Image (spheres, rainbow, N blue to C red):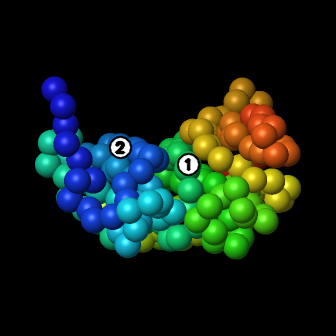
Amino acid sequence: PIFHTPVGKTPGYAGDPNGMLYRADHGIFHLFWQCDPASQLAGTKWCHAVSRNFVEWTNKPIALPTGSFSGAATLMDDEKQTPVMTFACFGDDRKDWSEATSGGMCQARPANLHDRYLVNWTLGDHDTDGLGMKHTDAGTGWRGPDGLWRLIVGNQMAPNVGAFKTWQSPDFG
């Protein structure tokens, strides 16, 4: 079967799906995607919708602000399975990442884990890896046997030169 999400009901640009997750404690699927309700060309915000059955979806307010590019969701292995969004972000909020002068990976966590719809997100510090590199397309994080959290991201090493980087942290922060 084909399931239709609320993307078609949202005006403006709808792009990459990012950070889909399921919260078993509330029985709710969360779908996030790049968007910009005011533009037809590009989206640097994350729109958000929720569903209990993958058929009926309800739009929620924009989850992440301008300057939030491709990313993914990771459910932490704590008691609450805290969702963490990790995404490419740029210090100068340019919509065209190729013109950005700085950038890195940013994270956002729910402002209130008791909110079943995860409407409000708290943005962490910019450039979580401290390298100032231009990253794109973060994957979902995982904890290795050594206890460290890891994340693979693509990044631009030089014009027309890309590479994957493994980012690691003891607390995924």
Q: Amino acid at mark 1?
A: Gly
Q: Earlier in the sequence, mark 1 or mark 2?
A: 2
Residue at (72% x, 27% y) in the render: 145
Residue 28 on image: x %, y %? 27, 49
Front-most of residues 107 and 5? 5
Query: Disc 2 residue type?
Result: Tyr
The image position of residue 74, as x and y in percent, is: 53, 44
Check disc 2 and report the residue beneath it.
22
Q: Which mark identifies residue 6?
A: none
Residue 87 in the image: state x and y as whole percent.
60, 53
User: Label 1, on which residue?
Assistant: 71
- Report helix, strand or loop for mark 1: strand
Of 36 and 63, the residue lying toward us: 36
Left or right position of 77 against 113: right
Question: Does the image show residue 149?
Answer: no
Q: Residue at x 23, y 53 (%)?
A: 8
Q: Secondary structure at mark 2?
A: strand
Q: Marks 1 and 2: which is nearer the front?
A: 1
